Amino acid sequence: MRRSVGFAFMVLVPFLAAVCLADESQTLTVSGKLIRVGKDSKIVDDATGTRTGDEQSREKIQDPSVVITQTYLNDKGIPVKTEVASASFKNGAVELQGLINKRACLLVSVNGVGEETLYLEAVAAPGDDLSFAVLDYVPPRRKDRILRVGESRMVEHSDGKFTIQGDLSSITDKDLSVATAEIRFMSETLPKGSATPASTSVLLDDGKFQFEGFVDEPTVVEVHVKVLNLREYWGVAHLVVEPNARIKISPSKTSSSYTRNKASELKATTEIVGSMHAELVESWQDSAVYLAKMDEYADSINSKEQEIPMHAEVDVEDSEKLRKVDPYEIFVELETIKHAVLSPIAKDLSDPMRALLAMELGAPESQQYEEWDRLAEVLDPDLVERRVKPRYSSRMKQRKSARNSKLVVKGKIAPEFSLSDLHGEEIELSGVLAENEVVLVDFWASWCGPCIETIPQLKELHADYKDKGFEIVFISIDAKYDDWKNESDKQELPWLNLGDLDGEFLAQTAVEYGVLSIPAKFVLSKSGEILQREVDTDRLKRLLVEQLDNESRK
């Protein structure tokens, strides 16, 4: 089975080594803090180690160790790795100092938090102050993380560098104390000479964050700000970055109040007049009609959240005002305003790059295969290969998955598949069905909290019914083999554990089953008939009693 290799790592290793060139010996200061986070995304222990809640947290504050190493090119052009500093956390905090005489490609390694070593890449110049945080989840149902705090830079000075600065400190009705900002490049492959930030995720610092990087061509980027529990907060900004771009992200009219497991819009503005971002994003986001509609949207959301109970005593006129509001209808109107700007640009092939960006930003034409075909005819072949073909393929898979979600249902025969386990052994669904009476096919991933939460209950059911003809087949849609393996080892899964790591939700098996979200559970009979789709553990237990428990058949 092909193992996925992280794109950022491939781009950064040669690039970072090349930019570590300054020659001025100064002190580098690195400070870190250990933050223990409970299952509700709230801080359990603060940086001093003082207990603030959650009796399930660890009884004793441990003292993890930190080692910082640097990599640079010597006079012969050979990468050299040396230790800069090392220390241990005390009461949840650590500060290290070391001398560097060249712009350094740093690797921060933390041991003693969980079972795995945590790594963080960063670029620093002599005299810099760096800050990082370790998120230690208790109980340990999530993977611990190490993140830069506030910013992720590439180099101090360089032509063509883009900067994205965010300030969400005005959002006061949401707890963003452990919120992260993540930058996502929509192009699967950036051109040679481009580079993503050293860390694509950072922990907000008093609501603020910053990313720096390089692009050789205008590129669509998304910035996601979220906490573990997306129902608490999740905001998204859409950007077009290009060489020398300076973009600021701030709350929109609705981004501080409406989440409910759905991304809220963040506002992105540029300092560069005449830029692609100004033309393709701000042209609708800052228009008077859009801003007025955003006011309506915010009012409708607030009214919906305050909607009165069905039997409450209230003035009839006020009741009608509240109940006739439908935020979704106003959301559709907002999308219409956006599309009215992007659609003509997408159709105007006199400037193919502008048209491509409009399509990538979600112009209605982006759903039509023939529009991508027309665009491919006028774009540079390299752009077609890197940005048109992957998007075209993704659209086809998305459509097929959406269609299959309505076809692969109760009463139908489940699609056959053949996938490898962690050791590379191929397992066919038909072979599993032949040896069992009831089979649960369960799509999951290492990053899926709800998936992992169901594992203890599934273990109980598996232990009770495996000798009566029940088997479970987990199918991971992780992007990386190591993520799949590490979480599988941690969970000690006692059943068949297969992987389809080629595209997450767009992996072939997930598409064939119409998986639009996870966990996605399919209960199959011996013949392959789907007995139930999207089943919870309580319903699964009842099905097993009905199908396998001898007492239920009497």
Image (spheres, helix red, strand yellow):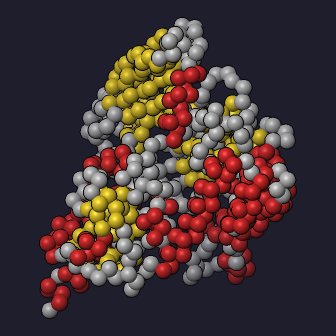
Q: Is residue 530 visible?
A: yes
> Between 56 and 3, which is closer to the camera in this rendering?
3
Identify the residue at image location x=48%, y=67%.
Answer: 511
- Whether residue 105 is situated above or below residue 353 in the rendered picture: above
In terms of image quadrants, where is residue 36?
top left
Position of residue 544 relative to residue 466, above or below, is below
Of 238 and 73, nearer the camera is 73
Residue 32 on image: x %, y %? 44, 27
Identity of the residue drawn at 35% across and 38% down? 51
177 relative position to 544: left or right: right
Residue sitting at x 36%, y 19%: 87
The quarter of the picture where residue 45 lies is top left
Task: State the image coordinates of residue 528 (x, y, percent, origin top left).
Answer: 32, 79
Residue 91 is at least partly visible in this image: no
Q: Quadrant of the C terminus?
A: bottom left
Q: Position of residue 259 (x, y in %)?
A: 58, 58
Residue 489 percent location from the top left of the image: 27, 49
How many discs appear?
0
| Residue that extends furthest to the top in the rendered view of this protein | 25
